[in-house]
Image (tube, rainbow, N blue to C red):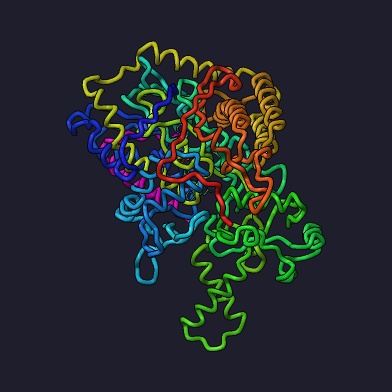
Amino acid sequence: MSVLDSKVPEGPIKDKWTNYKNKIDLVNPANKRNIDIIVVGTGLAGGSAAATLAEQGYNVKAFCYQDSPRRAHSIAAQGGINASKNYMGDGDSDYRLFYDTVKGGDYRSREANVYRLAEVSGNIIDQCVAQGVPFARDYGGLLDNRSFGGVLVSRTFYAKGQTGQQLLLGAYSAMNRQIARGKIEMFNRHEMLDVVKVDGKARGIITRNLITGEIDRHSAHAVIIATGGYGNVYFLSTNAMGSNATAAWKIHKKGAFFANPCFTQIHPTCIPRSGDYQSKLTLMSESLRNDGRIWVPARIEDAKAIQQGKLRPTEIAEEHRDYYLERRYPAFGNLVPRDVASRAAKERCDAGYGVNATGEAVYLDFAFAFERYGKEQAKIHGIKNPSKEEIIKLGQGIIEEKYGNLFQMYEKIIDENPYETPMMIYPATHYTMGGVWVDYNLMTTVPGLYCLGEANFSDHGANRLGASALMQGLADGYFVLPYTIGDYLSGDIRTGKIPTDSKEFDEVEKEVTERINFFLNNKGTKSVDHFHKRLGKVMWDKVGMARNEKHLKEAMAEIKAIREEFWKDVTVPGDANEMNMELEKAGRVADFLELGELFAKDALDRNESCGGHYREESVVKEGEQKGEALRNDTDFAYVSAWEYKGEPADAVLHKEELEFKDIELKQRSYK
Ligand SMILES: Cc1cc2nc3c(=O)[nH]c(=O)nc-3n(C[C@H](O)[C@H](O)[C@H](O)COP(=O)(O)OP(=O)(O)OC[C@H]3O[C@@H](n4cnc5c(N)ncnc54)[C@H](O)[C@@H]3O)c2cc1C
């Protein structure tokens, strides 16, 4: 029998969560005052959890490595947040959101969790509106919605291209109320470097003050990890440069299983890489695919001329353009899910049709949208016989209202005006669906240790649909964990304060200090970034958009070799008792160098194509779906949960078998 217990409640899917909430144990308000909770990470998931737990009466200690929770990576989220409100009257429902999410994730997520997510999605919008989040509204003042990939309805709530920022300000203001009341003690510029277990339960953490270098002990009755995703294992990604896997990886090494590490999202609409010295990639929100059309030249000679700078895209006639997503997937067109759109872009570029000097770019063109919106505006404003220029100008005004900040960002980076020339985009690492394994309560395999938001594996299966990460992070923090954690903490009401002067705290603090001293004393010859870039290259080339057995085996060996060299030859300048960003990076890259190998091992084990995980050995060979990814439900309808056993290569696989009782397993088709 599996050691994993998902704790999914019995009963019909639509009643599970309600019945469960009605029956689980609670902590009474007076006892909550005697219970301490640590929340590591104050992005949308951790921030919403910290605010809600403090509101309930628990004593919260919250930690982030930035100088304010307002700077969490969640601030970067552009496009929007999903909810099944059906405000557009286009047939949406909890069931449809549940269905789209399970199908979008290629049937590799836990049904009960996803249904609950859909069920609470509407509450998130109400909560955020009550906080004053300025969601976009239509002419009549009602909340507006737009559409994201992989769905046939419009259910995405947005605040221009700054949805994450506005939601984060909402969560931060809710936190601030509790900081002012003394219910949240906020530790900015503190990095959690390890977790402390006492009698098998998570009871505290060790942190480093990033300004002074001081090492501190913090105890609590439960520890929550909400530290975001691990996309930066690829070195280049759309994530904030500080995003890292240290907290998640450290708890993995202390007993939390790590699930589906190979499920990574490569986002189709990012600004293409420009050269070897780049340290960051930039996302162009998926919302742009509502109005932009994706194409490459249909003729190879035109593609070559463009690559050599001899031809402009606007000079290519309509009949010589290949709108390849509309051609291959007529039902969903430019709004196919991200994994499908990314692979299709790669296929065209690999075939030689890329549209920049590196050959790794496709166009995202708004010319049709300018015209469509312009004509509509001319009618609305009663302009008779408008000229083509007038129409385009009016249409550009509408696009500017919707996506102005994204267009501006593009122009600043590429130095080309996307109102005049189509944008260039290419897939880039963006999001990690894999993460720490959690049960229905969001508890890891370590009692009292929880994991929320992008850091956990739940809900998105093998591919996340656009605008669903914010929904999941806020569902976890505002509406799931605050209920489920009570069930565990009800057993702790008589425990009293957890002391930090115990041997368990001594031991972990010693480990942390020894590692810091090692880095500073190693005096090798190569920088931390040198190793991170090499890791990223192996990850992209061999564990990227297309994977095969040979490359995955090579990747595992190469990552191990880079890791061994890192420990021998890394150099970290500066001191421990000061602000030392190289030291911070060293610890994070050391963890990525282990995680990367487990990632490749997981990809090797999963010899099927599903969602963002594309195994070249597993594709449809014949018929209408020829060349498309081929899932294998007979052998792989499970969550891979890896147990740490020393070297990443020695990790032991535990399988959580996935049951589909409410959705029929089908081969995904967006044709
Ligand atoms: C460019 C971009 C655009 C996106 N747009 C959208 C969108 O439109 N819609 C959508 O649904 N999703 C979007 N996403 C995905 C979404 O933004 C993220 O998945 C989500 O914000 C993650 O939230 P989180 O709270 O889990 O983690 P984060 O926001 O990454 O927060 C992590 C927190 O953990 C802290 N932390 C990390 N490690 C430690 C440590 N060791 N010690 C102490 N603190 C630590 C950090 O300081 C931070 O407070 C986008 C992602 C990117 C990259």
Q: Examine the structure image and report whether residue 555 is included in the region drawn in magenta.
A: no
Viewer-proximal residue among 418 and 579: 418
Residue 616 position within the rendered picture, expressed as x and y whole percent measured from the top left = 68, 39
Is residue 408 among what the camera can see? Answer: no
Is residue 566 among what the camera can see? Answer: yes
Residue 510 position within the rendered picture, expressed as x and y whole percent measured from the top left = 47, 14
Residue 613 position within the rendered picture, expressed as x and y whole percent measured from the top left = 60, 40
525 lies left or right of 590: right
Residue furthest out toward the front: 623
Residue at point 47% right, 26% down? 257
Question: Which region shows up in magenta?
Answer: 162-189
Residue furthest out toward the bottom: 384
93 lies left or right of 461: left
**Where 374 falls versus 190 (above or below)?**
below
274 lies left or right of 659: right
Q: Quadrant of residue 145?
A: bottom left
Total marks placed: 0
Secondary structure predominantly adopted by residues drawn in magenta:
helix
Q: Point out the image quarter for the C terminus.
A: bottom right
Q: Examine the structure image and report whether residue 185 is included in the region drawn in magenta.
A: yes
Residue 291 position within the rendered picture, expressed as x and y whole percent measured from the top left = 55, 65
Residue at point 55% right, 43% down? 239
667 lies left or right of 362: left
Q: Point out the image quarter for the N terminus.
A: top left
**Where 52 falls versus 221 (above or below)?**
below
